[in-house]
Image (cartoon, rainbow, N blue to C red):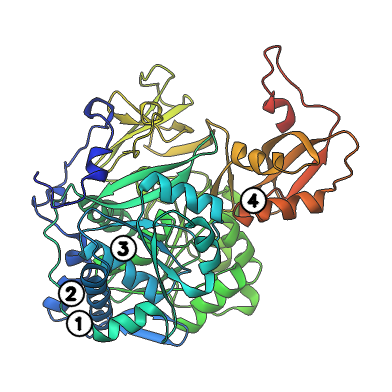
Amino acid sequence: MISAHRDPFARESLPPAEQRPEFRFDLPSLRYPERLNAADVLLDRHVREGRGGRRCILAPGTAWSYADLLDRANRIANVLVDDLGVVPGNRVLLRAPNTPMLAACWFAVVKAGAIAVTTMPLYRAGELRHMIEKARVRHALCDARIADELASATVDAGVRTVLFGSDDAELERRMVGASPVFENAATAADDVALIGFTSGTTGAAKATMHYHRDLLAICDTYGAHVLKARPDDLFAGSPPLGFTFGLGGELIFPLHIGAATLLLEKAPPADLLRAIGEHGVNVVFTAPIAYRAMTGMLADADIPSLRLCVSAGETLPAPVWQAWYEATGLKILDGIGSTEMLHIFVGSGVDDARPGATGKVVPGYVAEIHDDDGRPLPLGAIGKIAVKGPTGCRYLDDDRQGSYVRGGWNYPGDAYSLDADGYFHYVARTDDMIVSAGYNISGPEVEQALLAHAGVKECAVVAKADPAHGTNIVKAFVVRNDGATVEADELVAFCKERIAPYKAPREVEFVASLPRTETGKVQRYKLRS
C-alpha cells in the first residue's frame, strides 16, 4: 500500500520481510480497505451516523459525549498540525494518567496520521529518554502534573513538549482558537499508528509497532467474538492507557461499539470496586491480584451492574477465579496477550470460561504448542505457545525480532499445554521476565538500577511467589561492597528514583556471594529455589 506518512522513519524501521510474522485475515470482518484511519472508525463514524449525543468518556466530575470527544480531538489535531508542524508519520509521545484529555490527545495524534507513543505515568526520566531516542520523538503532549520527569528526559533532546490538564495550560489555550473540524489523514491500513514499549530480558525496552488496521483487528476478533460487550455498556479498569491491555480494554473496545468508558486516574482495588458501584460499570478490565483483593471487600460493596470481568497481564490462579465466582456469580474471563500482539489472542468468554485454563484461541488467530525447534507437540505436552493472526510482532529496529518471530509464528515467551477440548493451560514464562500484579518487569533492568548504588557490589533479581496475593514479587539478592552498610529500605528507595516504582524490589536479601557457573553466569534458578 502507498503510505500517507511524510516522515518515513517508522516504515523504514520495520523488521525485514523475512523476519515478520505471517498475518492471517481469515474472518470477513478483517478484510480492511487500503485507506484506513482508525480514528474515523472508532470516533468520527459514531457522530457521522447520528450517535454524537451518546455518552462516551466519563471521569469523576466529567461526562463527555461522542460529539464532545470529537470536538476536542479535532481541535488538538489542528494544534498539532497548524501550530506544531506535525506531519503524518511523526512520533508524538503521550504522558498522563487515565484522563479524558489523554484520550482526546491519543485520538488527535491518530487522526493527524502521526504515531502515538504511549507511555505510563510511572516511568522515570531514564526510561522516557530511552523511548524518546529509540522512537526519535520530537513532539510530546504531557499532563502538567507529571511534567518533571519528562522535562528531565528531554534536556537537549530536541523535543517540543506541550502541557495540558488545566485551563491555563498551553494546549488548552491553543485549543480555544483551533477549529473543531479536522480532515483525518488518509492513512494506509498498514501505516503505523501506535508504538508501545515493553521491557525486554536485557533490560532495554523494546518498541512494538502497530498499524491502523491492528487497532480495529483486536475489536473484530477478541472484542466481537469473545468479549461480546454491548453498546449500552460502561467500561472501566485499572491498567494505564499506556499499557496496551488498558488501551484496548478502556478505550478502543468500548468506542468501537459505541459504548462508554469510565477513566480513573488511580484505581487500586478498593477505589475500583467503589467506582463500579457508584457509576454502574458493566465491564471491568484488571489483573488477578485486584480480583483477589476485591473479593475480600465485597461484603461492603454493591455492584449489581457488573456483567463482564476480564483478567490479563499474568496467570489467573484457579482459587482466585473460584472465590470471585462464588462471591459474585460472575466468571472471570482470563486471557493472554502481549504488547507485541497488541491484545488478547487466547482467552475465555462467559460461555466457556474454566477455572485454571486461560481459554481457547480467539477467532481470527491460530495457536499451537511447539518444541524448541518449532515443531508442534501432542496434546498435553508442555512447550512454547506459538501464534498467528491479524496482529503480530514488529519491533522497531531491534535484533530481538528474530527471537520473537520464527517461521512466521509469534512466540510470546510463555510455556503452555493444550488439552483435548482446545483449552490452553499456562505453565510458566520461558524467559527472565517477572510478572507482578499485571506488569512485566525485566529483572536485568532492576539489577542495573541497584548496581548504580555505591554500596552494591553485585546483585541478581528474580521472581518470588507471593501466595497471599496470588502474584509474584520482585526479590533482589545483593552483595554489599566492602565496608558498605546500606540497608534494604535505602536500596528500594534508590531504585524508585531511577525506574518506575512498581519495578523496585519488594524484598532484598543480602548474601556473601551469588551462585555462578564456571563461566561466571549467575545461576538464577538456585536463587528462585
- Crowd band around label 3 with a 10 angstrom C-alpha radius: few (<14), some (14–19), many (20+): many
Q: Pointer 4 and pointer 1: residues touching (CB < 8 Å)? A: no
Residue 477 shows in this picture: yes
Left or right for 372, reference 434? left
Give the residue drawn at x 59%, y 54%: 500
Q: Nearer the viewer, mark 4 or mark 1?
A: 1
User: Mark 4 sits on what residue?
Assistant: 470
Residue extending farthest front: 156
Residue at the image point whose x is 20% and y is 38% from the top:
24
Residue at the far top: name it: 518
- Identify which residue, 230 or 16, lies in the foreground: 16
Task: Tell me which numbered mark, 2 or 4, is placed earlier along the sequence.
Answer: 2
At which x and y percent is residue 167?
A: 41, 87
Q: Report the residue at 8% width, 52% height from top.
A: 33
Q: What residue type is labelled 4?
A: Gly
Q: How far apart are the alpha carbons under marks 1 and 3?
A: 17 Å
Q: Which amino acid does label 2 sit on?
A: His
Residue 321 visible from this viewpoint: no
Badge 3 is on which residue?
A: 252
**Which comes sooner in the sequence, label 3 or label 2?**
2
Q: Mark 4 and mark 1: span between their CA atoms?
A: 42 Å
Q: Name the mark nearer the viewer: 2 or 4.
A: 2
Q: Which residue was labeled with disc 2?
A: 46
Give x and y (percent) for residue 375.
36, 18
In terms of image quadrants, where is residue 310? bottom left
Q: Which of marks 1 and 3 is nearer the N terminus?
A: 1
- Disc 2 is placed on an element classified as helix
Q: Which amino acid does label 3 sit on?
A: Ile
Taking depth in this image into account, of 313 and 340 the one nearest to the observer is: 340
Circles 1, 3 touching at the beta carbon (< 8 Å)? no
Q: Name the residue under label 1.
A: 52
Mark found first going from the N terminus, 4 or 3 = 3
